[in-house]
Image: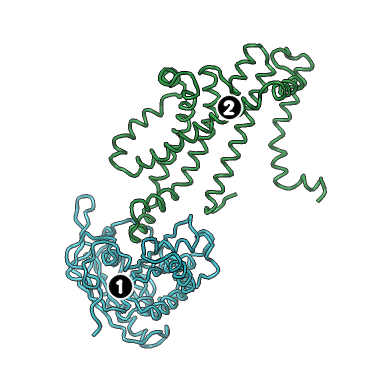
Amino acid sequence: MTVLSALQTPRAVKIRRGLTLPVLLLIFWEVSSRTGLVDARFLPSLEDVFLTAKRELVDNNLFGELTASLLRNIAGFVIGSAIGIVFATLLALSRAADALVTPTFNGFKQISLLAWIPLISIWFGFGEQAKIVFVAIAAFIPVVLNTYEGMRNVPRDLIEVGHALKFTNVQRVTRIFLPAAMPSIATGVHLGLIYSWLATVGAEYFLAVGPGVGGLIIAGRERFDMALVMVGVIILGLVGFLLNRLAAAGEAYLLRWRVTAH
Amino acid sequence: MTPVHLRIRNVSRRFNVNGTTLTALDDVSLDIKAGEFVTIVGASGCGKSTLLRLGAGLDVEHDGIIEHDGKSVDGPSLDRGIVFQEPRLFPWLTVERNVALGLENAAFSKAEKRQLVSEQIALVGLSGFEKAYPHQLSGGMAQRAGIARGLVNRPDVLFLDEPFGALDAITKARLQGELQDIWATEKITMVLVTHDVDEAVYLGDRVVVMSPRPGRIKQIVPVGLPHPRERTSAELAAIRNEVLDILNSTNGETPKLATRPVAAKRPVATANHIHAAHRAKLAQPAFSTTEI
């Protein structure tokens, strides 16, 4: 296959179109900072950003900062979504739990995540623990909402098949409710992953400065080093993009039994 | 005399719909012998599916006595298989694993279960499709998997609730033939509910004709022809006409709320085109040979 024809495949065309806007923005950015259209102190040139990224990566510990953020994110995400799935399953399957807890949860979810920060910092301090709690709450809410919805919509026909085949309560949950709700659970977990990454940065902003990409951005602002801020922002975007792709791939694998609609 | 396998004595079932009591089944009695193939036919609302669900133990809220091998039916049992109108396969499992669901709680070893599953899949003609997911199957293939799941535990009675109602005429005829073969090989009792008179007469040793509102047994017609049968034989046609006459004589009532415990989708059978000629010839006011 020649290079030219490789660029004509539907996938390549899709990628090219997706890249058009970011490339245009980059060009616009570079031109405006080079020509002095904007003050280079406010919007540093691409080259500046690149050099800063290199400096942070080689001389400073950019990789360590990123790892710190990611570990925090994963810890909070795993805790929040695991508790969320169990919690939502209980609510969906137990009438008593549903009547007791669901109204309260529906009130709870209306509260802005950021409103929790003062409470969290008083209860858990400003350290790692507090940040992970914050991230976990961010993941918990979409996971609960979607899991609950999925469990509630399990077809009655299939529940009856389980009844006819003498399924135990455990089999009902593991063989019918969980797999039938899996598309919704996957949506919730996917959203949870995105929210928890946003919350990771939020926690690093609003709770005490420690290692992490959020801390890097704050340091950039304090030193008036906009190139450093830009490096942080670009990393946040890239990681978010990659997490999203990862979640989509996981979802596609788990739900491969579904009719695929392209 | 073969012993009574399923005993249904003075069974009534009432439903409460918006404060009014609807009688779905009114004082129904029916004895089914071991190894017998009984078909139940009637218009919608005659309680035939209700009766089947009661027999299978999916519904236990009834008056009267229902016994299977002398034991009262107080819930589902693995000795009683059931096949629904919709195949009701679990979309996230392959054919093989769907069929294996029937053995989930059976006392077989892993190797025996594997063996049983592959035997059943072969029996219903799905060999080669073990790893397929339900969305990859045609309607007829999916229903075959549903039948295999109902049979895999070697129940001694199989209940079938309009199992071919949603299939096209050609697939339907083929599956009817195959079901008859399975019945002959496995020698189990079969109870099949249908609204297709041809099907009832072709498959049943006895055809139980029910009348609606309230659901009662109108008459039981013995078929008395050896299996496998010739669809076009004159004897079969005569019995079919007799069943149709009985059905039409039940046709006075005005339709009311259909009484079903679970609201299920019931697509109308799609066999019209093939049997249109028949229908025109017979010119029956309410019941065609195919559908009522």
Would you identify the image quadrant in which residue A22 lies? top right
Mark 1 lies on a secondary structure that is strand
* Residue A224 % position (x, y): 66, 11
Is residue B88 visible in the rendered image? The answer is: yes
Q: Which chain is green?
A: A
Q: Amino acid at mark 2?
A: Ala
Q: Mark 1 packing: few (<14 Cα in 10 Å), some, or many (20+)?
A: many
Residue A167 against residue A104 in the figure, above or below: below
Q: Quick one: B259 or B65, which is closer to the camera?
A: B65
Residue at 43% from the left image edge and 41% from the top image edge: A147
What subunit carries mark 2? A
Q: Quick one: A182 or B52, which is closer to the camera?
A: A182
* Residue A161 % position (x, y): 37, 59
Residue hosting label 2:
A68
Residue A218 against residue B237 in the figure, above or below: above
Task: Chain B: give its colour.
Answer: cyan
Residue hosting label 1:
B40
